[in-house]
């Protein structure tokens, strides 16, 4: 049986913390579908198209990773993508409490889907897309927070 995990998020932008979660998920599941949400109320920095382009550039040579956008309920979208698992990264107890409520709701609405929480290591526990956006707004170099050779200027 092939297991596909959906990793949903805003990814504005995709960081080393996100990359770590994808790496771990690839150790557990056959495929990872990274789903960039389009209907989030958060004000974005990168356009959804550029968020997707950035993530696709990272995983261009990995056939086990797909990158898509979505604007529906995450659980519904997981079913449509053939994903039986939703993966979320947990940095701290605030993340856990927030995600736990969503997990409980999804378990009722989409009983066939299992949500898996993956803990982040301490070096990424303080890393968030919003911190990266803040630094960018002040013209700082953010490359140490982004995967590999990503030049964020290409996606702004
Ligand atoms: P959302 O708006 O859905 O929280 P994000 O792009 O901020 O979207 O995060 C997507 C997922 O990645 C969430 O599960 C979040 O907890 C996780 N995540 C974000 N930053 C990190 C990090 N530094 N380490 C591990 N997981 C992270």
Image (tube, rainbow, N blue to C red):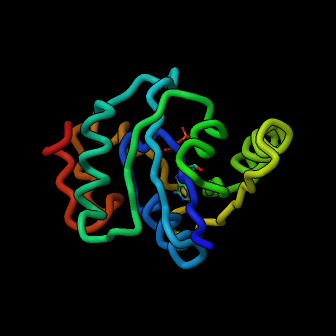
Q: Can you say which quadrant of the picture contains the C terminus?
A: top left
Q: Residue at x 66, y 40 (%)?
A: 75
Residue 105 horizontal side relative to residue 30, left or right: right
Q: Between 148 and 123, which is closer to the camera in this rendering?
A: 148
Task: Tell me residue 119's x, y (percent).
Answer: 65, 66
Residue in the picture at 45% in, 52% down: 34
Which of the 4 image quarters holds residue 61? bottom left
Q: Is 128 placed above or below 101 here?
A: below
The image quadrant that residue 62 belongs to is bottom left
Image location (x, y in percent) of residue 52 = 31, 44
Residue 151 point in image, percent of width and height:
17, 54
Residue sticking out furthest to the left: 154
Residue 130 in view of the camera: no
Above/below status of 38 relative to 141? above
- Up-down relation of residue 146 to residue 42 (above or below): below
Specify the farthest residue to the bottom: 27
Residue depicted at x 31% and y 42%: 51
Above or below, 9 against 96 in this view is: above
Q: Which residue corresponds to the image point at 60% horizontal and 67% vertical from the top-left?
A: 3
Q: Nearer the viewer, residue 84 or 44?
A: 84
User: In terms of image quadrants, where is residue 109?
Assistant: top right
- Name the foreground residue: 83 vs 16: 83
Residue closest to the far front: 1
Residue 125 % position (x, y): 57, 60
């Amino acid at each position: 049986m092939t297991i596909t995990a959906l990793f949903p998020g805003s990814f504005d932008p995709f960081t080393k913390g996100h990359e770590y979660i994808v790496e771990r998920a690839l150790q557990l599941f056959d495929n990872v579908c990274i789903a960039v949400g389009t209907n989030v109320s958060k004000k974005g920095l990168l356009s959804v198209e550029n968020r997707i382009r950035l993530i696709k550039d990272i995983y261009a040579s990995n056939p086990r990773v797909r990158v898509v956008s979505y604007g529906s309920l995450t659980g519904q979208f997981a079913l449509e993508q053939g994903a039986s698992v939703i993966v979320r990264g947990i940095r701290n107890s605030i993340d856990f409490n927030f995600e736990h409520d969503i997990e409980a709701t999804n378990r009722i609405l989409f009983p066939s889907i299992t949500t898996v929480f993956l803990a982040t290591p301490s070096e990424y526990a303080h890393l968030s897309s919003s911190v990266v956006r803040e630094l960018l707004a002040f013209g700082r170099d953010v490359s140490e927070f982004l995967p590999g050779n990503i030049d964020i200027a290409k996606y702004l």
